[in-house]
Image (cartoon, grey):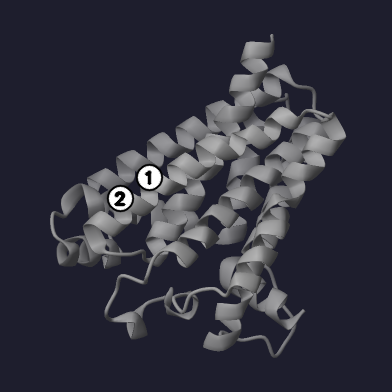
Amino acid sequence: MRLFFTALLFYTRLPVPKGIDHAPDALNRATLFLPVIGWLVGAVGIGTYWLGTVLFPPQFLPILFSMIATIWITGAFHEDGFADVCDGFGGGWTKQKILTIMKDSRLGTYGLVGLGLLLAVKFFALQALLSVEAFGWGVALKYVSAHSVSRLMAVTVIRALPYAREDAEDSKAKPVAQGLTTGQLLAATILGLAPLVALVIYTELWIYLTFLIPLWLVRWRLIWFFNKWIGGYTGDCLGATQQLTEVILYLSFVSLLWVSV
């Protein structure tokens, strides 16, 4: 429980019991709970959407409020990482230049355009999904799955690559830069895939498991890209991985619905 609350403290704005801090060793071991944070963020998002449909016309406003809720609860943690990756890899041509740009707190043109387009795709993907499928447990599990599985993809990047920054002492991602044990990765995998497996059982549609293929391809490509340019990953790279794979899973759900109509 202490490790879970440590993950909650680091990855969200939610309150935790007194005595929970940012101890590096605890933060490193708490990484396996990142998919569970996805459960919570997804639950808050879909709960906000449901409340929005009670108070407002469905689809547009409820979806927007849902996205605002998930961004607020995480403090835009992953969105910030995605924007920094856009700026760093868009404006830098050497490892040091890319890392320097990503560490800059200012938002550049690449980051602004990239984040804007990402949020737009996410909004319209959710709108398309919810305009075709009636709200229920199936929709809720899809929403939660996108958040948990995408965070699992970020966890696998930690296992696959070394940490890229030499000045890890000054990095916010230093606590998770020590790598993962096989046991931690296995636990994170079970926790991350649980909502997707629950969706398969609830709908009796095994095709949803095939959506792991495009996610794995995106994850493989990102790992290749990060390794080529900076020789590893940073915290921003993990955020970008989470955001991109979350959107890919939404698009997979929408594509299946469109083909089925």
Mark 1 residue element: helix
In this view, the residue farthest toward the front is: 182
Residue to which mark 1 is pinned: 221
Q: Is residue 92 left or right of residue 30?
A: left
Residue 20's place in the image compared with 258, above or below, is below
Name the quadrant containing residue 30.
bottom right
Q: Residue 139: where, in percent of width, then height?
A: 76, 33
Q: Are marks 2 and 1 in contact (CB under 8 Å)?
A: yes
Q: Does the rendering let one see residue 95?
A: yes
Q: Is residue 155 left or right of residue 226?
A: right
Give the spatial CA distance, label 2 vs label 1.
6 Å
Q: Residue 219: where, in percent of width, then height?
A: 45, 47
Q: Quadrant of the N terminus?
A: bottom right
- Hey, what amino acid is under mark 2? Phe
Q: Is residue 227 left or right of residue 151?
A: left
Residue to which mark 2 is pinned: 225
- Hey, what amino acid is under mark 1? Arg
Name the quadrant containing residue 106.
bottom left
